[in-house]
Amino acid sequence: MPKLYVIAGEPSGDFLGAGVLRELGDRCDIRGVGGHLMEAAGLVSLFDIRNISVGGLLEVVPHLLKIKRLIAQTVDDIAANRPDVLLTIDSPGFCFRVARLVRKRCPEIKLVHLVAPSVWAWREGRAAKLAKLYDRLFCLFDFEPRYFTKYGLDATFVGHPAVERFEFSEHRGKDTTLVMPGSRTQEIKSLLPIFLEAAKSVAGRLGTTRLVIPTLPHLLPLVKSIAGDDADVIADEEVKMQVYQSARLAIVASGTATLQLALSGCPMVVGYRLSELSYRLVKPLVKVRYISLVNLILNAPVVSELIQSDCTVQKITDVAVSLDEAEQLRQFKRLRERLTPGSTTPSKVIAEGVLRACGNKAREF
């Protein structure tokens, strides 16, 4: 039986990895690092990914020594188990460091990465470096492979597994506003108070009566401590998918959640704030006009983006109450078509690719 080692370092990667693990089933001996969704799909994680799920250029600094120790622990575990394939998912800050060390220490292991780094947005030179490090790359968006194939990397568009889990609905309720400040501690502390006040203001003008905050199980205490009694806080994945399909509106941080909402047909306003110093460091390097995945994929301002000083209660409220919901829904349908690889599912395409990378030890589907 082929041996696979899989690493996902944050919630978005955990979601992607869980779909792949479900498709692989018992066709591989699987070890690795993942979150609660991958664990529900059968993985026993080497450690809790909350230890490495840290965002921002400066925000990560206090955690560097701990992350360095976890990188060494992960590499040691991979070397001890000698998998046929190492599949890393997103989280380049952690995954690429592990991959470099594994390449030196265990050169016979095939290295495969899922989720192309955003070289089309900034630091295009990373594509050449990735081509030297990895054997194969799975791309979620159809415009990405060309950035890597020109350097000789086997890069393939596989579609986005979110299309498998989030069903589109045009039948929206009128009573619920979603408040979604992100999945990292610093994002929640920074954005939740603003989003919550904006949601209250929107509720007063639109007549919505219920505020809901979808979050992750380990973040429940933090979210509840900030939200108090002002909103219902939910962490169950099935319940979250239901509210994505039925809510009237979402106020959401830029990230994977914007894609999930769009695939569910939920109108939204996107907001985000970095620390001022992080923002000043990043802004000159960014080459794209948009930060939300919806706008990036469709190359159009489908959803409003309120960034840094524009991310205020008043501006979010003004945009939310004047949304052209019908036009957003029309564009969200186009988005869904762009993220579907054909007659099969993205997770199955990825799982088949992993098995092929394992060589003749793999059992075919």
Image (cartoon, rainbow, N blue to C red):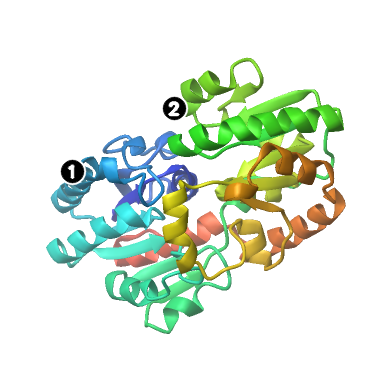
Q: Is residue 148 above or below residue 141?
A: below
In this view of the protein, can residue 174 be seen by the observer? Answer: no
- Between residue 168 and residue 84, name the one nearer to us: 168
- Amino acid carrying label 1: it is Arg
In the rendered image, which residue does mark 1 sit on? 69
List the single residue furthest toward the top. 229
Q: From the viewer's side, name the closer residue of 223 and 243.
A: 223
Q: Amino acid at mark 2?
A: His
The mark nearer the N terminus, 1 or 2, is 1
Tell me where residue 100 sits by quadrant.
bottom left
36 relative position to 245: left or right:
left
Q: Nearer the viewer, residue 156 or 298?
A: 298
Reply above or below: 58 against 147. above
Tell me, for residue 318, which label it has, or none. none
* Residue at 55% in and 31% down: 215
Report whether residue 177 is seen.
yes
Which quadrant of the structure image shows residue 86? bottom left
Pointer 2: residues within 10 angstroms few (<14), some, or many (20+)? few
In the rendered image of this protein, does residue 99 appear above or below residue 325?
Answer: below
Percent x, y of residue 232: 65, 21
Image side of residue 361 versus residue 268, left or right: left
Per the image, the residue denoted by label 2 is 218
What residue lies at 57% left-to-right and 57% top-to-bottom? 160
